[in-house]
Structures are given as structure tokens and as C-alpha cells.
Image (cartoon, rainbow, N blue to C red):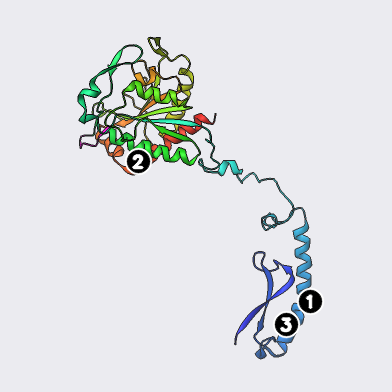
Amino acid sequence: MSVRRTRLVGCPGVWGGGGPATIARVSNGSFPPESGRRGGTLAIVLAALIPACCVAFWLLSSSPGGSKDDDADGGSGSTAPSASSPSPSATASPSSGKPLQGKVVVIDPGHNPHNRDHPSQIARLVDIGTNEKECDTTGTATNSGYAEASFTLDVARRVRTALEARGATVRFTQDGDRPYGPCVDERAEIGNTAHADAVVSVHADGAAAGQRGFHVILPKSVRGGGADTSAITAPSRLLGERLRSRFAKATGSEPAQYIGDGSGLDVRGDLGGLNLSTVPKVFIECGNMRDPQDAAELTDAAWRERAGRGIAQGITDFLNE
């Protein structure tokens, strides 16, 4: 015996989670023959009960205490969000709505994978405002040979992906597409020329084994020669603080205790990339490549993805203030 369900028009939601009410009928339109008179009696009872149910449902759904699902199903009324339901802005992902539209961010991947092939060029001295320093260096590496320059490019590209998804214009000082460098003075100039809203130079440290953690380097207030960081020290500190917070949260890393005061922030006046900057800029040393535990994280692609997102979120927080 086949059974089909017939919709009771005009009585939505009497049974089954707000769906249309139905009653069982056999394929020929009558109640099952084996029910005999009981089938007829059941039909009479149902016929009496269904209108009453519809009236009760209508009264409940029209009362002030009716279900919130009514509006969710397209009711014309509107209700304020409940206390347990976060507002859309609280649940939106950081990349939604392109909050960085119109912002320019310069990412400076520390060193260059090809620097080692040009020792004389990167060894030449350049003016860093307070004195002279080498154009660039090769950077450090893990004990297994994973180069800092490879690490910085990988993380920088992940940062770029996240920031561009939020609407920012992202520029690199180098993308592995130069024979060497650029020199530290040119790295600063790239950010200045771009009128960047923020610049972050990505690095990894080469301290002794056993010294773990990350730190953010902030510009010292210096004046002299071509250097004058007085206008950028305050916003750079804010950028560094936001970066420190988000990087720690994203990666689970602790601020380095072997440098500065252990807060994860270190102020320096000997870096040309900071001394010559006219826009907010910081360096982040993401970990110690010479420590086996830190190196295990730095060489892990999943960890680098978290690092990139943490840096991007720190920059986003700063730019949205």
C-alpha cells in the first residue's frame, strides 16, 4: 500500500518544525481500508482537531512571545539582536569588507637569496644617517641550511596575500627578482617614496642556541646626517605593539627574553632601514634560526602561514586605529 502526504493549505507549521501540516492518505485518496469504521472515525476526529490546532498556532505565533524563527523565515517584523547573538561586525572575518582599501603597505623581506653570489656588492658601505654600514648581508640560516632570506620571502608573500585580500596595496622591496639587495638605504627609500601607511621588515635572528622567541625592533629617536625619526617613533611603536600582540597570538611564540627588557620590543638607532624611514616602520625577528626548537617552527610551512597571518593582522589593527 502506497502512502502519500497531503498538504493542509492555510495551516503552516502545525507539525514538524514550521513545515506545512500534512495527514496520511492512501494512494486512492481514502483512508486505509483495513481501518474500517475506525478510519472513518479518525477522519472525523482529525477534521475537528485540525482547525483548532491552526487557531492555536496562529494565536501563539501572533503573540509578543512568539518564536524568533518567524522573522528568520521572512516575517515582516524586525527584532534587535539577542544578547547571545554577536553582531555581524563581531563575527565577520578580518578579511571581509576590504577594510584596508586605499592603504599602502610595504613589506621588506630581509636580505636576498642571491646576496651570497655578490659579496663585493653587498659589502660596500652606505650612509644610514648616523654613520655608514654595509649595503646588506646574507643573513643567517638554520643548522640544516635553511636560509633566512628564503624564510623572509616565504613569510612576506603570505603577509601580502592576507593584506591584499583585505584591499590593501602591498609593495615589496624585493621579491627574489633582483641580483642582490637592495641596500638598506634603498629599502628605506622604497617605503618613503610609496608614502606607505606602514612598513614591516621581516627577519629571523641568529642568536646562540637556547635563546628562543621573537622580538620587534622599533626606531630610536635619532637626528643627524640624513636621519630624523622624531615624527615616526610614536606611530612605529604603536605598529610594533600591535604586531607583537597578534604575532604571539597567531603563532603561540613567546617574546624573546635574551634581548631588550623581555617585553618583545627592542629600540635601536643603528639600523639604516629605520633611521632613514619617514613613515612608520618596524622590524620583526620571527624567531632564532640557530635554536633547534625555534628552527623546527621556522622551517614548518604551517607555522609560517600562521606567522604571516599574525603579521598581517597586526598591520591591520594598526591601520584601522
Give the side of residue 73 with respect to residue 101, left or right.
right
Above or below, comparing residue 290 to residue 126 in the picture: below
Q: Which residue is mark 3?
A: 42
| Disc 3 from disc 1: Cα separation | 10 Å
Return the mark for residue 79: none
Residue at the image point whose x is 69% and y is 45% from the top: 80
Q: Nearer the viewer, residue 173 or 306?
A: 173
Of tags 2 and 3, the one toward the viewer is: 2
Q: How many numbered marks appear?
A: 3
Residue 241 image position (x, y, % from top left): 45, 26
Q: Secondary structure at mark 1?
A: helix
Residue 39 image position (x, y, % from top left): 70, 86
Check the picture and name the quadrant holding the N terminus.
bottom right
Q: Secondary structure at mark 2?
A: helix
**Going from the N terminus, do you reach mark 2 or mark 1 first?**
1
Check the picture and name the quadrant holding the C terminus.
top right
Question: Is residue 147 a member of the stretch shown in magenta?
Answer: yes
Q: Amino acid at mark 2?
A: Trp
| Disc 2 from disc 1: Cα separation | 67 Å
Q: Amino acid at mark 3?
A: Leu
Question: Is residue 278 a member of the stretch shown in magenta?
Answer: no
Q: Which residues are magenta?
A: 143-148
Q: Residues within 10 Å of mark 3 (few under 14, many from 20)?
A: few
Q: Which residue is mark 1?
A: 48
Return the mark for residue 303: 2
Specify the principal SS of the magenta part: loop
